[in-house]
Image (tube, rainbow, N blue to C red):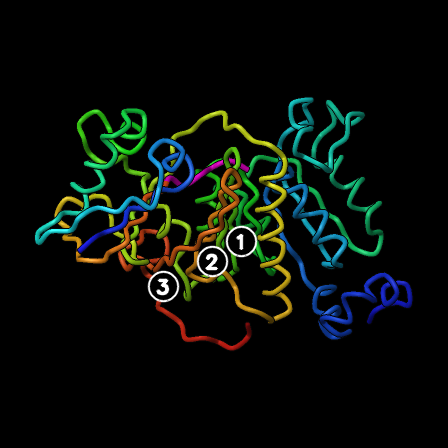
Amino acid sequence: MLSERELDRYRRQILLFGEEGQEKLKKSEIFIAGAGGLGCPISIYLAVAGIGTITVVDKDVVDQSNLNRQILHHDRDIGKKKTTSAREKLTEINPDIRVTVINTTIDETNVLGMAGSADGIVDAMDNFPTRYLLNEAAVKKGIPLFHGAIRGLYGQATTIIPGRTACLRCIFPNPPPKEVFPVVGVTPGLIGMVQANEVLKYLLGTGKLLENRLFLWDGLGAFTEEVCVERNPGCKTCGSIQKEGNKGDY
Amino acid sequence: MTIKIRFFARFRELLGTDILLAWTEGTILGSVVREVAKNNQEGYDAIFDAGGSFREFVILIRNGTRIETAEAEKTLVGDGDEIAVFPPVAGG
């Protein structure tokens, strides 16, 4: 049940989704892996949209060199845990939601326990080994994974619905080499918005998701592209899952 | 009787994009990408390793369908085909 304050806060988007849609968002729990370049804008926009429970996981403390893009963290937060900084800001931005933070490194021993009950997992990581762990957890639990990644002025995003779409390992069987990647804040801002938009559509059951579609952004040329991707029957992560029909729940 | 090669992201910076090439019967996907990449050494090195094989993270799409890099050297290209070549990005 939405409070009077919530009805007022979300009035302009209730015009889009109805109170029923807003209730769906309120009842949802989204797990955001990372409070960095992608995680900051994603968590801000999911918070203001009224996702009822947002869990943010990160292991780092705020560094001066983060501030060109990690917009939840301010100059005064340098040295503070990113999760603490994220909780403070997100709670200020929207006191009507529940923000949970976990200050840890995501690994194979804890990923299922942290993300296994969420309605969606947002990939806001900066490396593929952890992305593969999120992907495995998503596939094992049948939870959608909202993938995004960036480098410089380039980015990519896709939505993985286990059993229905290619998983992250089908699309990217081999990660690109590890590096200190160049980045300007507008790129994770843009890709993060694509991911957050996907989360909202999924939870509301509206629109057309980036299912089996890899969205590519070239900020240098201001081009968007889309390439079709498909399940790999031999995929070591999702190859054993039976292909499901469209359940109609999204 | 042409094929089109489309590079993305860093590959596009180094090699350009929407490159039209004459198609002939028996054209192999791997060979045609290699031929175009040779126009810029840095671009070539970004896509191929020292032994001349595709780097394993490179994504190849022919007419919207993924082609494994291991299959590229035996995959034939048809007249009018469009081949996309791009590097996934990993930052966040």
Instruction: Locate residue A46, reporting x and y percent.
Output: 70, 54
Give B45 or A169, whichever is nearer the viewer. B45
Give A117 or B1, whichever is nearer the viewer. B1
Q: Amino acid at mark 2?
A: Ile
Say which residue label 3 marks. Answer: A241
Magenta-colored span: B87-92
Say which residue label 2 marks. Answer: A160
Q: Secondary structure at mark 1?
A: strand
Q: Secondary structure at mark 3?
A: loop
Say which residue label 1 marks. Answer: A146
For this orientation, the residue located farthest to the right is A4
Instruction: Locate residue B89, reporting x and y percent.
Output: 45, 38
| Quadrant that contains the N terminus of chain A | bottom right
Q: Amino acid at mark 1?
A: Phe
Check if mark 2's residue and mark 1's residue have beta carbons within 8 Å. Answer: yes
Instruction: Locate residue A122, reporting x and y percent.
Output: 57, 50
Quadrant position of residue A85:
top right
* Protein chain holding label 1: A
